[in-house]
Amino acid sequence: MKVLGFDTYIESFTDGLQVLRYNKTTAYIPHMDWIDDPQKREVHNFESSRLGTNRFATILLYMSDLGEGDGGETVFKNGWPIDVPVEERKAKSQALEELRASGEASFLKTGSWEELMVADCRSRLAVRPHSARAVLFYSQHPNGEEDTSSLHGGCPVLHGEKWAANLWVWNGPRGGFIGSPKNKGREEKPDATQGYAQIKAVFRNTGKDPKFAQAKLYFQETYWGEFSHEDPPLNVNTFEGHEWNIKRISDGKLLKQIIIPGDRKKLHYEV
């Protein structure tokens, strides 16, 4: 918090530490940490450029070492390596061609989002994991508007294992705490403990429907987990109105969309 200019630690201004473990091939598609709610469906007001609050900074702490070529970097798709002259910048197509020729990621499916992401990681701004190293980036401009240059992802691990932890910091009290801004007309749920009624959902692929033989689960457009016939159930903490999508692996076609209702605390979905 001192790095970000706060005098003291403020519980309502952080999401708490989240510990991450990435095994071989594990990755996280590029996404924003800033929370988007354009329809103002949530109780909390996320419009930080006005009266709302949102995540404004992320500190990602590395707790393991990965060598050159091991993958696992944090990549910023809208940024270029700062130590590479403009005329020497590498196009994604070139990085992909070199990757395939090297055979370093031959265990990844050709044309898969994981393979294409490795090409991004080798052509765009990427920070390699190293113990005691940290990455700090901002999700907001000084005026509170979303800073899309912070679009980032976790590159696929090609060798070894990656451990990290991230801390999200807000520009004001987050939902559920005293002083947090609320959308007009959106009232707290009676059973909400911190401004939201958290719901535990379990998504299970029964293996009976061939349509879901090869699938992945997404929170909106953000990849969440493998969801094919042989994959284990996925347990998530979610909220009323959240959108979960099941997509086919081969072409990304939407197979099923699930909108979380608000009348239960625990849900089981099977396909």
Image (spheres, rainbow, N blue to C red):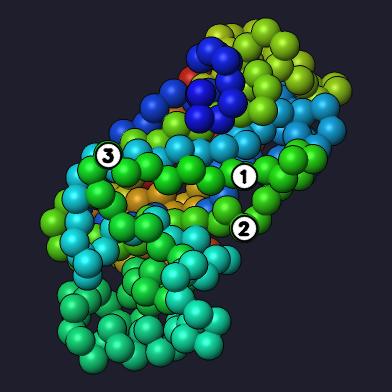
Label 2, label 3: how many angstroms apart (C-alpha)?
25 Å
Q: Residues within 10 Å of mark 2 (few under 14, many from 20)?
A: some
Q: Nearer the viewer, residue 130 or 72?
A: 130
Lower sequence index among marks 3 and 1: 3
Q: Residues within 10 Å of mark 3 (few under 14, many from 20)?
A: few
Q: Is residue 175 above or below residue 214?
A: above
Residue in view at x 37 percent, y 84 percent: 95
Q: Secondary structure at mark 1?
A: loop
The spot of residue 219 in percent (x, y) is 51, 47
Q: Which residue has dot 3 on it?
A: 132
Give the residue type that dot 3 points to. Ala
Secondary element under disc 3, as helix, strand or loop, is loop
Q: Are marks 2 and 1 in contact (CB under 8 Å)?
A: no
Residue 237: assigned label: none
Q: Is residue 187 above or below residue 250?
A: above
> Helix, strand, or loop for circle 2?
helix
Give the label on residue 149, or none.
Answer: 2
User: Where is residue 37 shown, x and y percent of the image?
Assistant: 71, 40
Three-letter residue code for mark 1: Ser
Note whether residue 31 is visible.
Answer: yes
Outermost residue, left direction? 160
Residue at 56% of width from left, 30% of height from top?
Answer: 4
- Tell me: 64 left or right of 122: left
Distance CA(mark 3)–CA(mark 1): 23 Å
Q: Is residue 227 left or right of residue 243?
A: left
Q: Report x, y in % for residue 237.
A: 44, 30
